[in-house]
Image (cartoon, rainbow, N blue to C red):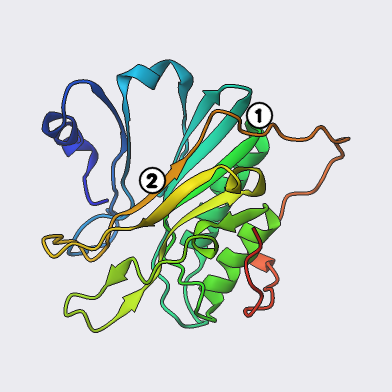
Amino acid sequence: HFIFDKNLMKIEKLLPNDLVVYSVGSFKDNSKIKRGRGKGGLSFIWHKSIDHITSRIMVKNNRIQCMKLDLPGCKMLVLNTYFPQDTQTDAFDEQDLLGCLSSIENILQNNIHDQAMLMGDLNADFSRDTRFVRTVRTFCQTHDLSAVWALFPIDFSYSSPCNTHFSLVDHFMLTKGLTENIITAGVIHRGDNVSGHSPVFLEMSTLSLPKKPEVKTHKVPNQNWKDAQTCNPHQGWSS
């Protein structure tokens, strides 16, 4: 998640030529002098054999990436995300987080689909009771997104450089119609992994994904996430 636009081609050169790479570069605020890596930056990688069922959805946010899969009997949105850091304080600049949530909500409301998957580094450990986590949890519950780790528990997905701190911040969040199609999910801890994040994986059957039930539509005002109300932090996830 630190590759700038000018270096995106390096990803493709590292992979076999039968794979398709769709990347969004990271960014830096040019009005400020900052050290270190850029913010955001994401990649989808899939085999060319399924390229005919994929379509890319453009998003004006370097922390959000989206594609639609035209599966048998089901149109599925897949959102790849890299949320800002949870400062674990109530006094933090929430504009970056709210921008991510607004972008996701806009995608869900303006693209025809039956099911949706939100995945990536949400930087939200749902065992914490922070303003950041409460905001993300409320958003997911509003849009009927359930955590895969409630069904397939794992220990952690991130460890600090000295292995003194562990947290579960990488997630798969699914609309409820998808949870019954999960085959397995988990995390891979390897000693040769130089990243603080451990890879997480999800295997799911796509042979009979449910379509969205037809309901009478009525206009619902957009949520203002700046005034979002928090939910009970001790409320568990439902599957």
Front position in the image: 94 or 215: 215
Q: Position of residue 126 (x, y in %)?
A: 51, 72
Neighbor class of circle 1 (other Cα within 10 Å; few <14, some 14-19, many 20+) is few
- What amino acid type is highlighted by mark number 1? Ile
Q: Is residue 133 visible?
A: yes
Regarding residue 225, the answer to whether it shows in the image is no
* Residue 164: image location, x then y, percent: 23, 84
Please, what secondary structure does the residue beneath circle 1 have? Answer: loop
In this rendered view, identify the residue nearer to me: 155 or 119.
155
Q: Quadrant of residue 50?
A: top left
Judged by depth in the image, the label closer to the viewer, 2 or 1, is: 1
**Residue 102: percent from the left, percent from the top?**
58, 51
The alpha-carbon separation of the residues under discs 2 and 1 comes to: 22 Å
Q: Kindly give the residue lying farthest to the front in the view shown.
A: 183
User: Height in image: 20 above or below 94?
Assistant: above
Q: Is residue 105 above or below residue 68?
A: below
Return the residue at label 2. Answer: 62
State the residue at coordinates (27%, 53%). Answer: 30
Helix, strand or loop status at disc 2: loop
Snapshot quadrant of residue 239 = bottom right
Q: Of marks 2 and 1, which one's residue comes earlier in the chain?
A: 2
Q: Is residue 132 left or right of residue 22?
A: right
Who is closer to the viewer here, 91 or 18?
A: 18
Question: Quarter of the image holding residue 116?
Answer: top right
What's the residue at 18%, 75% (across, down)?
161
Q: Residue 112 carries which label?
A: 1
- For label 2, the crowd category at 10 Å Cα-Cα, with few meaning under 14, some 14 to 19 and many 20 or more, is many
The image shows residue 27 at horizontal and vertical percentages of 29, 49
Query: Callout 2, which amino acid?
Result: Asn
Residue at 60%, 56% in the rendered image: 146
